[in-house]
Image (spheres, helix red, strand yellow):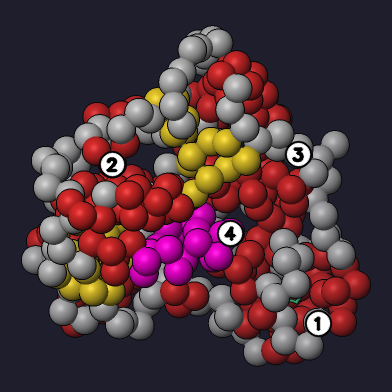
Amino acid sequence: MYALKVDPELCRQCPTIDCLMKCQHIRLDLETARKERLKILEGQDSRVLKDCLTCYACEEYCPYGNHPFYQIVDQQEEKGIWPVPIPLTKQQVVMMAPKGRAAPEKLAGPILDLCYFPMLSKTIRGKLYEGVSTVVGSDIFCNIMWLHFAKNSVIRERLPKVIDTLWGFYLKENGREEVICYHDECYGTYTHLAPAFGIPVPFKPIHLFEYLVERLEALKDQIRPIGMKAAYQRPCSNRLIPETQPLVDEIFKRVGVERVKRQYDGENALCCGGVLKAMQRDDQVEDLQKRNLDDMQASGAGLCVFNCPFCLFTLGEAAANRGMMPILMSELCQDALGEKLMMGG
Ligand code: SF4
Ligand code: SF4
């Protein structure tokens, strides 16, 4: 049930093996990359299964959409190769389980999905979110994080129920066919992962950035340009939805922020390191965060902009200690509209 859509022939004919050749964490020559990729395809053991840092990037690197990372995760789980120590994985699976508290609710206006980040609720206010209703909690937690834990089985089990809850209790109930996804993880789940696993999604996800651009257009006369340089910390789940990247530039332009040119941005972005901490790869966390922050600092950024709250929790304080104010994209827009900030910033 919910088998991953992979075309093995595409990989056998692939001239470049971009999925592994572009990997920033595993260094292979082309012939070795080809052999390792074929081993994964054929269900054999591969060093990639152990060395993978679960950064999601090869989902973006494959030019054919052949889901190399989802397949790595399937194989890790089948072989019991746990990226995060198994006691911690088991504990997280229990802690993040749906609590069954959701119920049909009357909601006015557009519906904004805050995933399982209740602390974000206080930030959804003012002109930017006028008339918007929010939904949040374990029952609509998108569950994509299990990709980091070699637990695709949990995604396959829980995601269809999450989709039913979101659709049945909140969207259909209120005559809405669209949901705005605050978190890249939710948008990536509904537009990229679910189709790859053949899980039906009956609603239309809207990325937060699309919503923000629309609101900034409507409120353009009230924007006070921020006039600062900013580095953007791209979240791992954005690797699934690179088509949303130009919207970062669009928002920055509208709020008067200059996106600094730096090495670790776009396709070359580095992850925040939060998941590596859970994996207890302490040396790698230190090196990765140092390179990322050095790069931001050298670029002259005064702001470090996040869209993922988990990235903000992981890297925000370290960015602040280097003189770069951490701020969520949503709050950056609120700042430009003269509103008081609630988180970050
Ligand atoms: S997953 Fe994509 S990039 Fe990797 S070998 Fe297959 S087709 Fe090529
Ligand atoms: S998920 Fe990241 S670390 Fe793992 S193989 Fe893909 S690109 Fe490399």
Instruction: Tell me, yes or no, whether the highlighted magenta stretch contains residue 248.
Output: yes
Q: Residues within 10 Å of mark 2 (few under 14, many from 20)?
A: many
Residue at the image position 48 percent from the left and 39 percent from the top: 180
Instruction: Tell me, yes or no, whether the highlighted magenta stretch contains residue 91.
Output: no
Q: Position of residue 313 (x, y in %)?
A: 27, 47
Amino acid marked by disc 2: Leu
Residue at the image position 87 percent from the left and 82 percent from the top: 13
> Marks 4 and 2, how far apart in space?
26 Å
Residue under label 4: 240
Which disc, if any, is residue 199?
Answer: 3
Whether residue 268 is situated above or below residue 154 in the rendered picture: below
Q: Quick check: can you spot residue 279?
A: no
Q: Quadrant of the N terminus?
A: top right
Q: Earlier in the sequence, mark 2 or mark 3?
A: 2
> Marks 2 and 3, how far apart in space?
33 Å
Q: Which one is closest to the eye, mark 1 or mark 4?
A: 4
Is 268 on the left or on the right of 48, as rendered? left
Q: Position of residue 14 (x, y in %)?
A: 81, 82
Q: Position of residue 55 (x, y in %)?
A: 51, 62
Q: Residues within 10 Å of mark 3 (few under 14, many from 20)?
A: some
